[in-house]
Image (cartoon, rainbow, N blue to C red):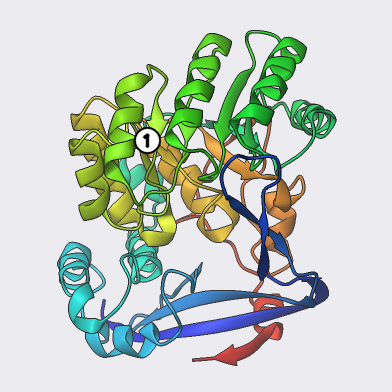
Amino acid sequence: MKITDVKLLTLELPEEVPAREFDLVQVPNLRRIQYTHERTGRMQKERTQFLKVTTDEGIDSIVTTDTRIGPPERVPILRRLVVGESVFEREVLWQKLHKGTRWVYQQPGWFGDFDNCLWDLLGKAADLPLHALIGRARDRLPVYLTGDDMTLEGYLEHIDVAKTMGINAYKFHTYKGGKADIPIFEAVREAVGPDYDLLNDPVCSYDLREAIEVGQVMENLGFVWLEEPMHEFNLNLYQELCDALTIPVMGNETLATDISISSQWLIQGGTDQLRGNVRAGATNVLKMAHLAEMHGTRIELHSPGVLFGLLHATLGCCIDNTTFFEFMSSQATSLRAQGERYGLMSAPLIEAGHVAPNDLPGWGAEWDMDRFNSLVVEEL
Protein backbone atom coordinates (compact mmCIF):
# COMPACT_ATOMS: atom_id res chain seq x y z
CA MET A 1 0.00 0.00 0.00
CA LYS A 2 1.67 3.22 -1.22
CA ILE A 3 1.12 6.77 -0.03
CA THR A 4 -0.36 8.93 -2.79
CA ASP A 5 -0.92 12.29 -1.08
CA VAL A 6 -0.71 14.26 2.16
CA LYS A 7 -3.15 17.13 2.66
CA LEU A 8 -3.83 19.70 5.36
CA LEU A 9 -7.55 20.49 5.65
CA THR A 10 -8.92 23.43 7.61
CA LEU A 11 -12.50 23.08 8.87
CA GLU A 12 -14.53 25.99 10.17
CA LEU A 13 -17.63 26.00 12.36
CA PRO A 14 -20.14 28.85 12.21
CA GLU A 15 -19.95 29.54 15.96
CA GLU A 16 -17.55 32.17 17.23
CA VAL A 17 -15.17 31.31 20.08
CA PRO A 18 -12.42 33.25 21.89
CA ALA A 19 -9.32 33.41 19.71
CA ARG A 20 -6.26 31.54 20.92
CA GLU A 21 -4.24 34.69 21.51
CA PHE A 22 -3.09 36.03 24.85
CA ASP A 23 -1.83 39.08 26.68
CA LEU A 24 0.82 38.75 29.37
CA VAL A 25 -0.22 39.83 32.86
CA GLN A 26 2.07 40.18 35.86
CA VAL A 27 1.09 37.97 38.80
CA PRO A 28 0.34 40.13 41.86
CA ASN A 29 1.58 39.65 45.42
CA LEU A 30 4.86 37.94 44.55
CA ARG A 31 8.35 39.06 45.59
CA ARG A 32 9.58 38.33 42.08
CA ILE A 33 8.35 39.29 38.64
CA GLN A 34 6.22 36.48 37.24
CA TYR A 35 3.78 36.50 34.34
CA THR A 36 0.69 34.59 33.41
CA HIS A 37 -1.66 35.09 30.48
CA GLU A 38 -5.21 36.08 29.74
CA ARG A 39 -7.12 35.91 26.48
CA THR A 40 -7.38 39.10 24.47
CA GLY A 41 -11.14 38.70 24.15
CA ARG A 42 -11.15 38.75 20.35
CA MET A 43 -13.72 36.37 18.89
CA GLN A 44 -13.39 34.31 15.73
CA LYS A 45 -15.04 31.38 14.04
CA GLU A 46 -13.79 28.10 15.43
CA ARG A 47 -11.30 26.31 13.21
CA THR A 48 -9.62 22.92 13.51
CA GLN A 49 -7.05 21.46 11.15
CA PHE A 50 -6.81 17.86 10.01
CA LEU A 51 -4.09 15.93 8.20
CA LYS A 52 -5.27 13.48 5.55
CA VAL A 53 -3.09 10.74 4.06
CA THR A 54 -4.38 8.87 1.00
CA THR A 55 -3.16 5.59 -0.51
CA ASP A 56 -3.26 3.75 -3.82
CA GLU A 57 -5.63 1.16 -2.33
CA GLY A 58 -8.33 3.68 -1.50
CA ILE A 59 -7.76 3.52 2.26
CA ASP A 60 -7.38 6.97 3.80
CA SER A 61 -6.61 8.32 7.26
CA ILE A 62 -7.68 11.61 8.83
CA VAL A 63 -6.40 12.94 12.15
CA THR A 64 -6.52 16.27 13.92
CA THR A 65 -3.24 18.15 13.79
CA ASP A 66 -1.50 20.81 15.84
CA THR A 67 0.20 23.47 13.74
CA ARG A 68 1.94 24.82 16.85
CA ILE A 69 4.19 21.76 16.57
CA GLY A 70 4.15 21.46 12.79
CA PRO A 71 3.33 24.63 10.82
CA PRO A 72 1.42 24.39 7.52
CA GLU A 73 4.61 24.70 5.46
CA ARG A 74 5.64 21.23 6.67
CA VAL A 75 2.95 19.64 4.48
CA PRO A 76 4.71 20.14 1.12
CA ILE A 77 7.91 18.87 2.78
CA LEU A 78 6.11 15.75 3.98
CA ARG A 79 4.50 15.27 0.59
CA ARG A 80 7.86 15.43 -1.14
CA LEU A 81 9.50 13.00 1.30
CA VAL A 82 6.80 10.33 1.72
CA VAL A 83 4.61 10.11 -1.39
CA GLY A 84 5.33 6.77 -3.06
CA GLU A 85 6.56 5.17 0.16
CA SER A 86 4.91 2.10 1.70
CA VAL A 87 2.47 2.64 4.54
CA PHE A 88 3.99 -0.40 6.23
CA GLU A 89 7.48 1.12 6.41
CA ARG A 90 6.40 3.13 9.43
CA GLU A 91 9.61 2.72 11.44
CA VAL A 92 11.78 3.47 8.41
CA LEU A 93 9.84 6.68 7.82
CA TRP A 94 9.89 7.60 11.51
CA GLN A 95 13.67 7.24 11.68
CA LYS A 96 14.14 9.17 8.45
CA LEU A 97 11.94 12.10 9.48
CA HIS A 98 13.18 12.09 13.09
CA LYS A 99 16.84 12.11 12.13
CA GLY A 100 16.19 14.56 9.31
CA THR A 101 14.33 17.12 11.43
CA ARG A 102 17.35 19.43 11.62
CA TRP A 103 17.96 19.22 7.89
CA VAL A 104 14.47 20.22 6.80
CA TYR A 105 14.43 23.01 9.43
CA GLN A 106 11.38 21.87 11.37
CA GLN A 107 10.58 21.66 15.08
CA PRO A 108 10.80 18.37 17.03
CA GLY A 109 7.58 16.39 16.61
CA TRP A 110 6.74 18.10 13.32
CA PHE A 111 5.65 14.87 11.59
CA GLY A 112 3.70 13.39 14.51
CA ASP A 113 0.30 13.62 12.86
CA PHE A 114 1.66 11.85 9.77
CA ASP A 115 2.97 9.06 12.01
CA ASN A 116 -0.49 8.79 13.57
CA CYS A 117 -1.98 8.36 10.10
CA LEU A 118 0.43 5.51 9.34
CA TRP A 119 -0.67 3.67 12.47
CA ASP A 120 -4.31 4.24 11.51
CA LEU A 121 -3.72 2.89 8.00
CA LEU A 122 -2.00 -0.18 9.44
CA GLY A 123 -5.04 -0.95 11.57
CA LYS A 124 -7.43 -0.37 8.70
CA ALA A 125 -5.41 -2.60 6.37
CA ALA A 126 -5.49 -5.37 8.99
CA ASP A 127 -9.16 -4.63 9.77
CA LEU A 128 -8.23 -4.53 13.46
CA PRO A 129 -8.32 -1.88 16.18
CA LEU A 130 -4.87 -0.64 17.07
CA HIS A 131 -5.25 -1.73 20.67
CA ALA A 132 -5.31 -5.29 19.30
CA LEU A 133 -2.17 -4.74 17.22
CA ILE A 134 -0.16 -2.84 19.83
CA GLY A 135 -1.37 -5.02 22.68
CA ARG A 136 -3.76 -3.93 25.40
CA ALA A 137 -2.69 -3.73 29.05
CA ARG A 138 -6.14 -2.75 30.38
CA ASP A 139 -9.70 -2.40 29.15
CA ARG A 140 -10.27 1.17 30.31
CA LEU A 141 -8.39 4.11 31.80
CA PRO A 142 -9.41 6.34 34.74
CA VAL A 143 -9.93 10.03 33.99
CA TYR A 144 -8.83 13.11 35.86
CA LEU A 145 -10.38 16.53 35.29
CA THR A 146 -8.09 19.53 34.87
CA GLY A 147 -9.26 22.96 35.99
CA ASP A 148 -8.23 26.51 35.22
CA ASP A 149 -6.82 29.01 37.72
CA MET A 150 -9.69 29.45 40.21
CA THR A 151 -10.63 30.45 43.72
CA LEU A 152 -11.14 27.81 46.40
CA GLU A 153 -14.88 27.93 45.77
CA GLY A 154 -14.33 27.56 42.03
CA TYR A 155 -12.17 24.47 42.50
CA LEU A 156 -14.71 22.83 44.81
CA GLU A 157 -17.54 23.50 42.35
CA HIS A 158 -15.46 22.07 39.51
CA ILE A 159 -14.64 18.96 41.53
CA ASP A 160 -18.38 18.51 42.03
CA VAL A 161 -18.76 18.53 38.23
CA ALA A 162 -16.10 15.82 38.03
CA LYS A 163 -17.92 13.73 40.61
CA THR A 164 -21.15 13.85 38.57
CA MET A 165 -19.15 12.19 35.76
CA GLY A 166 -17.77 9.53 38.09
CA ILE A 167 -14.31 11.13 38.00
CA ASN A 168 -12.32 10.65 41.19
CA ALA A 169 -9.21 12.68 40.41
CA TYR A 170 -8.62 16.40 39.90
CA LYS A 171 -5.66 18.51 38.75
CA PHE A 172 -5.15 22.12 39.73
CA HIS A 173 -3.94 24.66 37.19
CA THR A 174 -2.73 27.60 39.22
CA TYR A 175 -0.63 30.68 38.53
CA LYS A 176 -0.87 32.49 41.89
CA GLY A 177 2.38 31.27 43.45
CA GLY A 178 3.06 28.81 46.24
CA LYS A 179 2.04 31.06 49.13
CA ALA A 180 -1.49 31.33 47.72
CA ASP A 181 -1.69 27.69 46.64
CA ILE A 182 -0.91 25.97 49.94
CA PRO A 183 -4.05 27.00 51.87
CA ILE A 184 -6.21 26.13 48.85
CA PHE A 185 -4.71 22.65 48.62
CA GLU A 186 -5.19 22.08 52.34
CA ALA A 187 -8.83 23.21 52.20
CA VAL A 188 -9.62 21.08 49.15
CA ARG A 189 -8.02 18.00 50.68
CA GLU A 190 -10.14 18.47 53.80
CA ALA A 191 -13.27 18.86 51.66
CA VAL A 192 -12.76 15.82 49.39
CA GLY A 193 -11.28 13.44 51.95
CA PRO A 194 -8.14 11.28 51.87
CA ASP A 195 -9.12 8.93 49.03
CA TYR A 196 -9.71 11.48 46.25
CA ASP A 197 -6.70 11.85 43.93
CA LEU A 198 -5.28 15.39 43.66
CA LEU A 199 -2.57 16.61 41.28
CA ASN A 200 -0.91 20.00 40.83
CA ASP A 201 0.25 21.77 37.66
CA PRO A 202 1.37 25.33 38.47
CA VAL A 203 2.40 25.87 34.83
CA CYS A 204 5.95 27.10 35.48
CA SER A 205 4.81 29.64 38.08
CA TYR A 206 7.09 28.55 40.96
CA ASP A 207 10.73 29.18 41.66
CA LEU A 208 12.83 26.42 43.19
CA ARG A 209 12.16 27.39 46.81
CA GLU A 210 8.40 27.54 46.21
CA ALA A 211 8.43 24.23 44.36
CA ILE A 212 10.17 22.53 47.29
CA GLU A 213 7.86 24.12 49.88
CA VAL A 214 4.69 23.33 47.97
CA GLY A 215 5.95 19.87 47.06
CA GLN A 216 6.51 19.02 50.71
CA VAL A 217 2.98 20.15 51.57
CA MET A 218 1.66 18.06 48.68
CA GLU A 219 3.52 15.04 50.05
CA ASN A 220 1.83 15.49 53.42
CA LEU A 221 -1.56 15.87 51.71
CA GLY A 222 -1.14 12.74 49.59
CA PHE A 223 -1.02 14.37 46.14
CA VAL A 224 -0.17 12.16 43.15
CA TRP A 225 2.40 14.31 41.32
CA LEU A 226 3.85 17.80 40.85
CA GLU A 227 3.84 18.81 37.19
CA GLU A 228 5.88 21.48 35.40
CA PRO A 229 6.44 23.67 38.49
CA MET A 230 9.28 25.70 36.94
CA HIS A 231 10.35 26.74 33.47
CA GLU A 232 12.14 23.92 31.68
CA PHE A 233 15.18 26.04 30.88
CA ASN A 234 17.24 24.91 33.87
CA LEU A 235 17.93 21.20 34.17
CA ASN A 236 20.01 21.76 37.31
CA LEU A 237 17.07 23.28 39.21
CA TYR A 238 14.87 20.32 38.34
CA GLN A 239 17.62 17.97 39.47
CA GLU A 240 17.67 19.75 42.85
CA LEU A 241 13.89 19.58 43.07
CA CYS A 242 13.73 15.86 42.29
CA ASP A 243 16.40 15.21 44.92
CA ALA A 244 14.49 17.24 47.54
CA LEU A 245 11.06 15.62 47.12
CA THR A 246 9.62 12.14 47.34
CA ILE A 247 6.48 13.05 45.35
CA PRO A 248 7.07 12.43 41.62
CA VAL A 249 8.08 15.53 39.66
CA MET A 250 7.08 15.65 35.99
CA GLY A 251 9.02 18.38 34.26
CA ASN A 252 9.18 17.87 30.51
CA GLU A 253 5.81 18.86 29.04
CA THR A 254 7.16 21.38 26.54
CA LEU A 255 9.98 18.97 25.68
CA ALA A 256 7.73 15.95 25.18
CA THR A 257 7.73 16.26 21.40
CA ASP A 258 11.03 14.40 21.06
CA ILE A 259 12.21 11.27 22.85
CA SER A 260 15.83 12.31 22.34
CA ILE A 261 15.27 15.38 24.53
CA SER A 262 12.96 13.77 27.09
CA SER A 263 15.30 10.83 27.54
CA GLN A 264 18.12 13.09 28.67
CA TRP A 265 15.95 14.71 31.33
CA LEU A 266 15.03 11.31 32.72
CA ILE A 267 18.57 9.92 32.54
CA GLN A 268 20.03 13.03 34.20
CA GLY A 269 17.48 13.03 37.03
CA GLY A 270 15.72 16.22 35.96
CA THR A 271 12.31 14.55 35.96
CA ASP A 272 10.89 11.54 37.78
CA GLN A 273 8.23 10.80 35.17
CA LEU A 274 7.81 11.55 31.47
CA ARG A 275 5.08 13.65 29.88
CA GLY A 276 3.90 12.61 26.45
CA ASN A 277 1.41 13.69 23.81
CA VAL A 278 0.40 11.78 20.71
CA ARG A 279 0.42 15.06 18.78
CA ALA A 280 4.14 14.27 18.38
CA GLY A 281 3.26 10.81 17.07
CA ALA A 282 2.22 7.47 18.51
CA THR A 283 5.65 6.02 17.75
CA ASN A 284 7.27 8.72 19.88
CA VAL A 285 4.84 8.05 22.75
CA LEU A 286 5.43 4.29 22.68
CA LYS A 287 9.21 4.71 22.60
CA MET A 288 8.98 7.11 25.57
CA ALA A 289 6.74 4.66 27.44
CA HIS A 290 9.26 1.86 26.95
CA LEU A 291 12.09 4.15 28.06
CA ALA A 292 10.18 5.05 31.22
CA GLU A 293 9.37 1.39 31.86
CA MET A 294 13.05 0.46 31.66
CA HIS A 295 13.77 3.16 34.25
CA GLY A 296 11.04 1.91 36.57
CA THR A 297 8.85 4.97 36.13
CA ARG A 298 5.78 6.20 34.28
CA ILE A 299 4.66 8.26 31.32
CA GLU A 300 1.53 10.38 31.63
CA LEU A 301 -0.32 11.61 28.55
CA HIS A 302 -1.09 15.31 28.25
CA SER A 303 -4.61 16.47 27.31
CA PRO A 304 -7.17 14.33 25.44
CA GLY A 305 -4.78 14.39 22.49
CA VAL A 306 -5.67 13.73 18.85
CA LEU A 307 -9.16 13.03 17.46
CA PHE A 308 -10.91 14.27 20.60
CA GLY A 309 -9.46 11.57 22.82
CA LEU A 310 -9.49 8.52 20.54
CA LEU A 311 -5.71 8.16 20.36
CA HIS A 312 -4.97 8.70 24.04
CA ALA A 313 -7.78 6.32 25.01
CA THR A 314 -6.15 3.65 22.86
CA LEU A 315 -2.55 4.32 23.88
CA GLY A 316 -3.43 4.73 27.54
CA CYS A 317 -4.95 1.27 27.53
CA CYS A 318 -1.89 -0.17 25.74
CA ILE A 319 0.70 1.31 28.13
CA ASP A 320 1.04 -0.44 31.47
CA ASN A 321 3.09 2.30 33.11
CA THR A 322 0.57 5.13 32.84
CA THR A 323 -2.13 6.20 35.26
CA PHE A 324 -4.76 8.55 33.86
CA PHE A 325 -6.54 10.08 30.88
CA GLU A 326 -6.57 13.88 31.12
CA PHE A 327 -9.88 15.61 30.45
CA MET A 328 -9.60 19.38 30.07
CA SER A 329 -12.27 21.66 31.48
CA SER A 330 -12.44 23.62 28.23
CA GLN A 331 -14.01 20.58 26.57
CA ALA A 332 -17.25 20.95 28.55
CA THR A 333 -18.45 17.51 29.62
CA SER A 334 -18.37 15.50 26.37
CA LEU A 335 -15.54 14.65 23.99
CA ARG A 336 -18.09 12.80 21.84
CA ALA A 337 -20.12 15.99 21.32
CA GLN A 338 -16.96 17.94 20.48
CA GLY A 339 -16.02 15.47 17.78
CA GLU A 340 -19.51 15.23 16.32
CA ARG A 341 -19.42 18.90 15.42
CA TYR A 342 -16.72 18.04 12.86
CA GLY A 343 -18.27 14.77 11.74
CA LEU A 344 -16.30 12.45 14.04
CA MET A 345 -19.02 10.25 15.50
CA SER A 346 -16.98 7.93 17.72
CA ALA A 347 -14.91 10.03 20.14
CA PRO A 348 -14.73 8.30 23.54
CA LEU A 349 -17.39 8.72 26.19
CA ILE A 350 -16.53 9.18 29.84
CA GLU A 351 -18.41 6.42 31.63
CA ALA A 352 -18.10 5.82 35.37
CA GLY A 353 -15.04 8.05 35.37
CA HIS A 354 -13.19 6.05 32.69
CA VAL A 355 -12.54 6.08 28.94
CA ALA A 356 -12.04 3.07 26.70
CA PRO A 357 -11.09 2.57 23.04
CA ASN A 358 -13.69 1.17 20.68
CA ASP A 359 -13.22 -1.86 18.44
CA LEU A 360 -13.36 -0.16 15.02
CA PRO A 361 -10.29 -0.58 12.78
CA GLY A 362 -7.31 1.70 13.28
CA TRP A 363 -7.81 4.45 15.82
CA GLY A 364 -11.54 3.77 15.75
CA ALA A 365 -12.69 6.89 13.90
CA GLU A 366 -16.18 6.74 12.41
CA TRP A 367 -16.82 9.71 10.14
CA ASP A 368 -19.85 11.52 8.79
CA MET A 369 -17.94 12.59 5.69
CA ASP A 370 -20.78 14.74 4.38
CA ARG A 371 -20.60 16.78 7.58
CA PHE A 372 -16.79 16.81 7.50
CA ASN A 373 -16.51 17.89 3.86
CA SER A 374 -19.15 20.60 4.26
CA LEU A 375 -16.91 22.35 6.81
CA VAL A 376 -13.69 22.41 4.76
CA VAL A 377 -12.68 26.00 3.99
CA GLU A 378 -9.00 25.54 3.07
CA GLU A 379 -6.90 22.76 1.60
CA LEU A 380 -3.12 22.66 1.33
The quarter holding residue 116 reads: bottom left
Q: Is residue 56 above or below residue 228?
A: below
The residue at 37%/45% (across/down) is 252
Secondary element type, mark 1: loop
Query: 36 or 71, which lies in front?
Result: 36
Residue 12 in view, yes or no: yes
- Farthest residue toward the front? 31
Q: Which of the image's four quarters has the N terminus?
A: bottom left
The residue at 62%/47% (across/down) is 348
Q: Label 1, on which residue?
A: 136
Q: x, y (%) of residue 238?
A: 33, 36
Q: x, y (%) of residue 110?
A: 35, 71
Label 1 Cα neighbours within 10 Å, binned few <14 / some 14-19 / many ≥20: some
Q: Amino acid at mark 1?
A: Arg
Say whether residue 60 is left or right of residue 261.
right
Say whether residue 191 is left or right of residue 137.
right
Q: Is residue 118 above or below residue 360?
A: below
Q: Is residue 53 above or below residue 155?
A: below
Say whether residue 294 is left or right of residue 298.
left
